[in-house]
């Protein structure tokens, strides 16, 4: 795992430990919190066209950055709680997706792999 991620996870552990929050950080609770934060992220794009979502005002971009950080931090905590190396899992998923979505059949369309 990248050193920066390890350092960030260590900071999260310390932050939680100092507040005695580890007792609340079961995988279930972390997954629920992650979903809630992802919903808060989505609120910034609700009712916005695809085009407008690419041209957000700077204040909205700042708000989105804060929500992305919340999602990222909960994701790191959940992977840590389950002993999952998130970088390795992501690399494996990219390889699996490359098999499911070969370039010659998936380029330029958004169909699910079962429909290619």
Image (cartoon, rainbow, N blue to C red):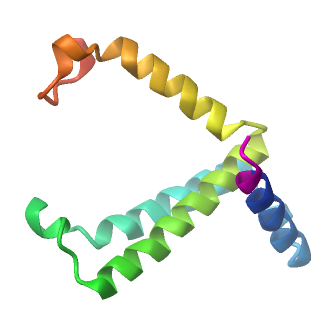
Q: Is residue 7 magenta?
A: no
**Position of residue 21 in the picture relative to residue 74 (left or right):** right
Query: Does the magenta portion include 2?
Result: yes
Indicate the quadrant where residue 51 lies. bottom left
Residue 80 at what x, y percent from top left? 76, 47
Q: Who's the residue at 22% across and 76% down the image?
A: 56
Image quarter hosting the N terminus = top right
Q: From the viewer's perspective, is residue 24 above or below residue 116?
A: below
The quarter of the image holding the C terminus is: top left
| Residue 35 visible in the picture | yes
**Who is closer to the viewer here, 30 or 61?**
61
At a point 78% along the width and 52% down the height, the residue shown is 6
Q: Residue at x 77, y 65 (%)?
A: 12
Q: Main secondary structure of the magenta part?
A: helix
Is residue 115 visible in the rendered structure shown here? no
Q: Residue 28: horizontal and vertical position, in percent?
A: 66, 49
Q: Residue furthest front?
A: 3
Q: Left or right: 79 with respect to 97?
A: right
Q: Which residues are magenta?
A: 1-5
- Residue 7 vs 52, above or below: the answer is above
In the image, residue 36 lies at what x, y percent?
Answer: 48, 63
Q: Residue furthest bottom?
A: 59
Callout count: 0
* Picture quadrant of residue 101: top left
| Residue plotted at (39% across, 63% down) | 39
Judged left or right of residue 74, residue 12 is: right
């Amino acid at each position: 795992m990248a050193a920066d991620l390890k350092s960030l996870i260590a900071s999260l552990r310390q932050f939680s430990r100092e507040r005695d929050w580890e007792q609340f950080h079961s995988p279930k609770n972390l997954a629920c919190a992650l979903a809630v934060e992802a919903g808060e992220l989505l609120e910034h794009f609700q009712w916005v066209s695809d085009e407008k979502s690419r041209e957000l005002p700077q204040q909205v971009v700042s708000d989105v950055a804060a929500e992305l950080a919340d999602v990222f931090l909960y994701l790191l905590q959940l992977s840590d709680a389950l002993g999952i190396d998130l970088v390795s899992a992501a690399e494996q998923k990219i390889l699996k997706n490359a098999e499911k979505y070969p370039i010659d059949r998936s380029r330029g369309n958004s169909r699910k792999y079962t429909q290619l």
